[in-house]
Structures are given as structure tokens and as C-alpha cells.
């Protein structure tokens, strides 16, 4: 016959073991949540951005971003918005060029359209053009943007340099 003291020791051991098991489950779950890949249909992955990167679209998209996205993703896309810490998994760092170069425009468009908890879906909140515009803006966080004007400048520089590097 176990005494009360023995019983409570056994109970405590069981409790401790369950607690450890629970901690492990939570850690494994958290790890999986963090690295879940986005499953994007192939035909959407391949879509080309139909919205040209003009100064005026980018300005409008900047406004939408500040309204709808910055509270989580931060003004500059670093994932440090005022609400970022309330969410798990945390909003991704959109300035990480390595990360962003591994996804196509179509994938970013899909991510913005569908969302994934805790990120909301913007399919009904924003038009297709607005979402494609945000793809341009999101890209600009990790890669300097080529607006039509800066592209011309880059071209001119390229031509001016060409004879020097290749006499
Ligand atoms: C409620 C906070 C919240 C809002 C608002 C929000 N996001 Fe997110 N976003 C997240 C979180 C959290 C993730 C990571 C989700 C995941 O990995 O499951 C994410 C992921 C993303 C990704 C994918 C990045 C990656 O590599 O995982 C993109 C792109 C993105 N958001 C863009 C936007 C844009 C553009 C807006 C505004 C139209 C927006 N988000 C609004 C929280 C938010």
C-alpha cells in the first residue's frame, strides 16, 4: 500500500514527465510553423507582373502598404511593425534579399492574395492591380527598384562605361 507521500511523489513524476512532453510538442510545432513552405500553384508561380513600376503606382502602393501592411511588416519591410510581436509566426523580413530572390513575383502575389494566419487575405480587400503593385513595392525592399527613368539612366551609364571596359 503506497503512503500518501509516495503517491504524491509518483503523481509529481508523472506531471513532470507530461510537462516535458508538452514542452517538446510545443517546440516541434513551433519549428514547423516557422518553416512551413508556401504551397503556390505552378501556374500562379509563373505569372508575370502586369503592373509597370511607374513613380505614380509606387506612390499609391506605398500608401496602401502603410495602411494595410506596415503595422506588422514595419515601414521598411523588416518585419518590425508595432503589431509584429503579437504574432506567431512573426512577419517575415521582406528586406532579406536571399529570401526574396528565391520567390517569383507570382508567389509574392499569391502570398498577398491568400494570406496565411496570422496574415490576413487581401483578395477581397484590394484589387488585382493593387496587389501586383504591392509585389513591386515588396521587391523594392530587398532590390533597388528600376523605374522607367532610373532604367534609362542605368542604360546611359552602361553605354558610357562600355568603351572604357572594352577598348
Ligand atoms: C496581421 C499582420 C500582418 C499584416 C497586416 C500583413 N502581413 Fe504579411 N505576413 C504576416 C506574417 C505573420 C507572415 C508570415 C506568415 C507565415 O509564414 O505563415 C507574413 C508573410 C508575408 C509575405 C511572405 C513572406 C515570406 O517569405 O514568408 C509577404 C510577401 C507579405 N506577408 C506581404 C504583406 C503585404 C504586402 C501586406 C499588406 C497588403 C501584409 N503582408 C499584411 C503578417 C502580416
Image (cartoon, rainbow, N blue to C red):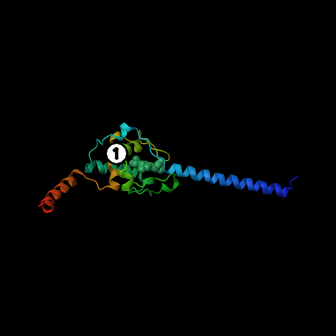
- Which residue is most to the right? 1
Which residue, given by chain and number where applicable, does mark 1 sit on? 105
Residue at 13% in and 62% down? 164
Residue at 30% in and 50% down? 58
Helix, strand or loop for disc 1? helix
Q: Position of residue 114 (x, y in %)?
A: 43, 41
Residue at 61% in and 50% down? 25
The quadrant of the image that shows the C terminus is bottom left
Note whether residue 62 is visible.
Answer: no
Q: Nearer the viewer, residue 102 or 78?
A: 102
Q: Position of residue 9 (x, y in %)?
A: 79, 57
Q: Nearer the viewer, residue 95 or 102?
A: 102
Q: Quick check: 43 left or right of 167? A: right
Residue 8 lies in quadrant:
bottom right
Q: Position of residue 123 (x, y in %)?
A: 41, 39
Q: Position of residue 100 (x, y in %)?
A: 37, 52
Q: Quick check: 25 left or right of 136? A: right
Q: Residues within 10 Å of mark 1 (few under 14, many from 20)?
A: many
Amino acid at each position: 500500500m503506497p503512503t500518501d507521500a509516495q503517491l504524491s511523489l509518483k503523481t509529481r513524476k508523472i506531471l513532470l514527465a507530461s510537462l516535458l512532453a508538452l514542452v517538446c510538442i510545443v517546440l516541434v510545432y513551433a519549428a514547423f510553423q516557422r518553416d512551413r513552405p508556401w504551397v503556390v500553384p505552378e501556374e500562379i508561380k509563373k505569372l508575370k507582373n502586369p503592373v509597370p513600376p511607374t513613380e505614380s503606382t509606387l506612390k499609391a502602393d506605398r500608401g496602401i502598404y502603410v495602411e494595410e501592411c506596415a503595422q506588422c511588416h514595419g515601414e521598411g519591410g523588416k518585419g518590425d511593425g508595432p503589431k509584429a510581436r503579437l504574432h506567431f509566426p512573426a512577419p517575415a523580413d521582406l528586406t532579406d534579399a536571399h529570401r526574396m530572390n528565391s520567390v517569383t513575383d507570382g508567389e509574392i502575389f499569391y502570398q498577398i492574395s491568400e494570406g496565411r494566419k496570422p496574415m490576413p487575405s487581401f483578395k477581397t480587400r484590394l484589387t488585382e492591380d493593387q496587389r501586383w503593385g504591392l509585389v513591386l513595392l515588396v521587391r523594392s525592399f530587398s532590390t533597388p527598384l528600376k523605374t522607367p527613368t532610373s532604367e534609362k539612366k542605368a542604360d546611359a551609364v552602361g553605354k558610357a562605361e562600355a568603351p572604357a571596359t572594352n577598348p
